[in-house]
Image: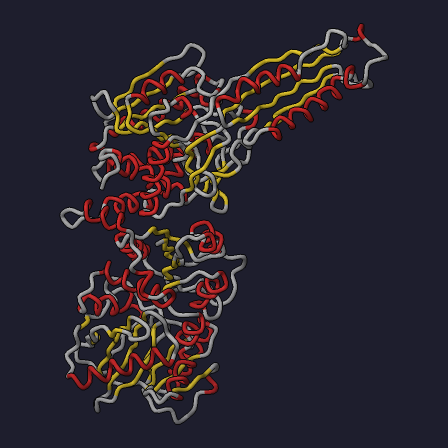
Amino acid sequence: MRVAVIYNKSQDVEGVINVFGMQNREVYNPQTVERVAAALEKGGHNVRIIEGNINVIEKLTAFMPRVVQGEKPGMVFNMAYGLQGVSRYTHIPSLLEMSGIPYVGSSPAGHGVALDKVTTKMMLESSGLPTAPFWVLMSPDLVPDDLPYPVIIKPKMEAVSMGIEVIDNKKALQVAISNLVKEFNQPVLVEKFIPGREFAVGVLGNQAPETLPIVEIDLEGDPNAIQSLDDKLKTPKAKICPALVDDKLAEELRRLAKETAHVLGIYDFCRIDFRMDENNNLFVLELNSMASLGFTGSYVTAAKAAGYTYDSLVNRMLDVAVERYFGNQQIDQVSTDEKLLTQSSTKNNKPPVNVRLRSYLRGNLGTMEEDLAKMVGINSYIHNIEGINSFGRLIANQIQNFKFQRQVYPRAEFANNLYFSNHASDHNDILILGNLDNAIPFSDFVPFREERGRIYGSGVSRGKGGLVTLLSALRALHYTRNLKKVKCGILLISDESLSGRSSKQLIEELSRKSSYVIGLGGAGLAGEIITSCSGILRYSIEINRSSDKINTKLTDKQTDPLLYVSDKISKLQKIGIKETGISVIITNIKTKGGEDTAPDHVSLSFRIHYPQPQQKDNLEKEVYQLFKSDPKWPIHVHITRGHQRRPLLESEDDLSFYKKIEQLAKIVEVRTKKSHGDIGTSLSHVPDEIPSLDGFGPVTGNIGRKDEYVVRDSLIDRAVLLALTIHRAATNFKS
């Protein structure tokens, strides 16, 4: 399941439009957030950590499954306390409710009530549940004369014991109220202080919730002691769990805890705090609808006493929310293949390899971005040979860190092709094909930038994004000690932009020595894996008009180069209509002429995409016939055939290979879709009998345009899929 862990940074002023109202001071330690994410990954989930600020919905939209398209639902594990303003606990749940995204934890209504201590006490009183007498004051002038001191005060809508203080006289109370109102800008709750013992009871579940073992806060024999903010954050008081209480008291605490959660409308999990006076009377202090998952907190302490590990607690919390939304069936929908992978990969109590790969890669997203920024900064335009070779040296230095040997294949008119191998055998389990060049001249260069979850920059979609996923996958396999188990070859060509004109023979030779071949081309927005691809014919047409052959009997289309070209373009488009799968794309038109006269020169460039090899000859004949010059016309036509690429046909072996990849993708919850490509791929030079697929690079958009981009989060997903593909190739994709 895809699970987004949402949390808040302290004072995240960049994540809001304006700073408004009371600012949140309650945040999770980033280590705790990471610990929760790691626990969910160990549970087999695809996890992202997302900041709960103004950009949260956009990031969730990119990450969450498309349920309306048939994908399984995802969940949010909400750890966000909110950023600012009133009822901050409710903000993320409200956005999730509006967006239709299921989540762990209480609804906005439940959080709103629980965070508002006054409303909580009013609902407890009206339901007959025991709570201490209380008063709500907004001004020190309103303090009654007959308060039963000592009293305890706290802000009306804060948590973690913020502003809490025990006071035993009116003057001190007036000063304290004045300070709290000034600091928190909200009413102050004043309660009768209950000397005695303090307990915390954790609740987990919904219809028949589990109560965790009772925790007693060790007040060291002082019935007047309390837990201050410093106690909770810096020097937590010792906890006795299970608490030393008799069965009758334990049962009453459990009953009151469950009833309190029910009355306040709390979902999935919470913690209820109690005080017990010298006569064994229990009083509900408050309910925390976002019980802390810090390692030293009462909730985690109780869960451990109940037999949970930290990992199993976190995954159980997710499960009870899934059960609430979807019933028990969703929890049990783990594919047989995922179970097999887990069983076959788990040794010495280690998580399965797919979990370790994903955990490593998620923690190294920053490194991926840094790599991509460096790559974009190098001008590797197809005709910049030194730039491509420099880029190749950068990549080679990193690949060789993983004990790959490099072989250089120099080419006279092109930059070097590079081949890497991590073994001495004559045969690869898998050959990975990438490219060092790109088709973008420096005059059209777009620098690296990250914006709203997308990474822009020249070459990110057609080569550099794929190389980032490759390096990341190799790092993850090396880190998990799985790289040496596979015989892997890597071929980086320098003429992809020219259809592999000089490298096609090398591609063919190395492919014949490999069991599988995969390409690092960018995936489409639906995660497309390319099983077949159109061939491409490219042409440049030059049309000149001679002034000495003007004949008034000729039509304008026979004498005017621009009208001539317009007529030919119309006829070119009809070629694509006649046969299914053929398309004609006009790539450039330029004219030259005097300032006050019609153009006497027109250049036209176009390409034809065709799916079947047998279509090529007829298409070429049609082009040459269409632009055949008539000696009687004052128009001269010159045709130049550009670099071509033959189609990649889908074979039964390719389809079988795709099904294996699709199976892996389901295990790691990465979107894939079998697709026919229309841009062209160097895998067309792979012999038909060798299973080959393209599209293992990151998810991309606007391929081939100046504003091309990759989806930032897809760097993780595609690197996971690539790493697992490399790993499983060693066993021919058997479990």
Work out whether 457 lies above or below 383.
below
Q: Vertical placement of 615 versus 465: above or below? A: above
For the N terminus, give its image quadrant. bottom left
The picture places residue 693, in percent across and down from the top left corner, at 38, 32
Write the residue at 39% across / 83% down: 121
Q: As drawn, which residue projects farthest toward the bottom? A: 146
Q: Is residue 318 above or below residue 263?
A: above
- Front one among 290 and 544: 544
Asked if 129 appears above or below 598 in the picture, the reply is: below
Residue 537 sits in which quadrant?
Answer: top right
Position of the C terminus, as image quadrant, is top left
Quadrant for residue 67, please give it: bottom left
Q: Is residue 669 left or right of residue 58?
A: left
Residue visible at 50% across and 57% down? 16
Residue at left 29%, top 23%?
A: 420
In the drawing, does residue 547 fall left or right of residue 320? right
Most foreground residue, 642 or 399: 642
Q: Is residue 36 visible?
A: yes
Residue displayed at 34% across by 33% down = 470
From the top left corner, tell me how far across and down residue 166 is, in percent.
32, 81
Q: Position of residue 403 (x, y in %)?
A: 23, 27
Work out whether residue 531 or residue 451 is closer to the camera in this orientation and state it: 531
Residue 428 position in % (x across, y down): 26, 25
Q: Is residue 13 visible?
A: no
